[in-house]
């Protein structure tokens, strides 16, 4: 989940995520949360 | 191995952070005027220094910095861009002056007054002037410092993180500073990002935002300071071009903070959506601050050397006094 796990796990998604610098992980998570809120707003939740 | 299997080692630690965060909200809800974020740090310190963090929980607890940085990215949703742009040049000037002046002052005090030698003064100067432990590690890497020198400087910075986390909010209250004044003061004077944000929010939400934004501006100078140090120490990293070093040390989550601030101020999201993003940011901060408290080991702090503590203390007193005068005069 954090960027210090360098060995392959067999899952491309996990490997790509763990290879990311923590700053990029935070950026991706933050923008993901904002995107979820935008989608929720479009769906009439907010 | 799938996503679920990869996440499994992190679950005990995440559960520990979640229980700590829940407890912080319950305690803060029961006592008038108590901030959940402050209680979260206290809960972490209490658990970390009594029962300790179980080995099984270590991987999950280590995610606290990711939570802190994601919380900061989302804090962009609460920022009123016009207000920050108006005060921006003043705050930016203060940040550059305190980082540049602070590094020179710390080098002078550590080498001249306290007779520290080698790369230790530079590690202490970077930790105290830019962004705490991450600056110590980054500059240590640039200068090829010994592992023991990095550990020593990092422990000194952590000691001051713990002390200033308590002292700054008390001083801010006593001095009667406004939220903006206190936030900028803490943002330019304190060391690591987590304690700066925690101290800011302990004062008020407005101070928390200003403290975080000011601290982010300071953190973004790490790359420039790393390049300056590598040149000052006989261009040891000549094979590593300056721009690459600048980018390598640049805190990438800062771009996310700016992007979220731009989205929030564009009017794309409704007030209810922005409020919900703010709640997610608060929750991430609470989790991160429990982790921050867990990482503060009071016993390890007694082993920090007297000369290093003296040098950093003099530096902190001078910088924070000058910064206090500046924020009172300018903001």
Image: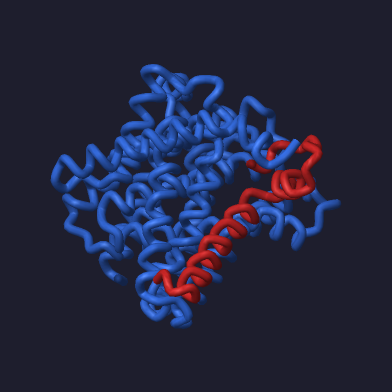
> What colour denotes chain A?
red
Q: Residue furthest right?
A: B239
Quarter of the image that includes the N terminus of chain B: top right
Left or right, A43 with reference to B246 = left
Chain letter for the part of the structure drawn in blue: B
A38 up-or-down from B18: above or below: below
Identify which residue, B4 or B331, lies in the foreground. Answer: B4
Identify which residue, B240 or A36, lies in the foreground. Answer: A36
Q: x, y percentage for residue B88?
A: 43, 74
Identify which residue, B310 or B136, lies in the foreground. Answer: B136
Q: How many marks?
A: 0
Q: Residue furthest left?
A: B32
Is residue B89 something one can see in this rendering?
Answer: no
Quarter of the image that includes the C terminus of chain B: bottom left
Q: x, y percentage for residue B75?
A: 43, 62
Q: Residue at x 64, y 58 (%)?
A: B250
Q: Residue at x 39, y 61 (%)?
A: B278
B92 up-or-down from B174: above or below: below
B200 up-or-down from B286: above or below: below
Left or right, A36 with reference to B174 = right
Identify which residue, B144 or B282, lies in the foreground. Answer: B282
Q: x, y percentage for residue B171?
A: 23, 48
Q: x, y percentage for residue B247?
A: 70, 60
């Amino acid at each position: 989940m954090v960027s210090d796990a360098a060995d392959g796990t067999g899952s491309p998604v996990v490997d790509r995520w763990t290879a990311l610098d923590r700053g990029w992980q935070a950026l991706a998570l933050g923008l993901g949360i904002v995107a979820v809120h935008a989608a929720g707003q479009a769906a009439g939740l907010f | 191995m799938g996503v679920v299997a990869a996440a499994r080692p992190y679950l005990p630690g995440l559960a520990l952070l979640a229980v700590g965060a829940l407890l912080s909200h319950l305690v803060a809800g029961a006592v008038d005027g108590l901030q959940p974020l402050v209680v979260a740090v206290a809960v972490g310190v209490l658990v970390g220094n009594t029962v300790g963090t179980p080995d099984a929980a270590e991987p999950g607890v280590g995610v606290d910095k990711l939570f802190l940085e994601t919380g900061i990215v989302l804090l962009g949703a609460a920022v009123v861009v016009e207000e920050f742009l108006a005060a921006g040049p003043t705050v930016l000037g203060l940040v550059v002056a305190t980082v540049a002046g602070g590094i020179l002052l710390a080098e002078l005090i550590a080498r001249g007054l306290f007779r520290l030698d080698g790369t230790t003064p530079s590690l202490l100067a970077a930790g105290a002037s830019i962004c705490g432990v991450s600056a110590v590690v980054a500059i240590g890497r640039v200068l090829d410092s010994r592992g023991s020198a990095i550990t020593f400087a990092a422990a000194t910075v952590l000691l001051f993180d713990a002390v200033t986390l308590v002292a700054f909010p008390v001083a801010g209250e006593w001095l009667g500073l406004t939220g903006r004044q206190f936030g900028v003061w803490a943002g330019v004077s304190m060391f690591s990002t987590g304690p700066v944000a925690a101290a800011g929010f302990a004062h008020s939400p407005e101070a928390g935002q200003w403290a975080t934004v000011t601290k982010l501006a300071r953190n973004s100078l790490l790359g420039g300071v790393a390049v300056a140090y590598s040149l000052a120490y006989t261009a040891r990293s000549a094979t590593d071009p300056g721009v690459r070093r600048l980018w390598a040390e640049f805190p990438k989550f800062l771009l996310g903070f700016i992007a979220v601030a731009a989205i929030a101020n564009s009017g794309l999201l409704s007030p209810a959506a922005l409020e919900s993003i703010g709640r997610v940011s608060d929750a991430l901060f609470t989790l991160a601050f429990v982790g921050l408290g867990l990482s503060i080991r009071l016993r390890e702090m007694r082993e920090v050397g007297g000369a290093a503590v003296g040098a950093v203390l003099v530096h902190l007193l001078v910088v924070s006094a000058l910064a206090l005068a500046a924020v009172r005069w300018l903001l």
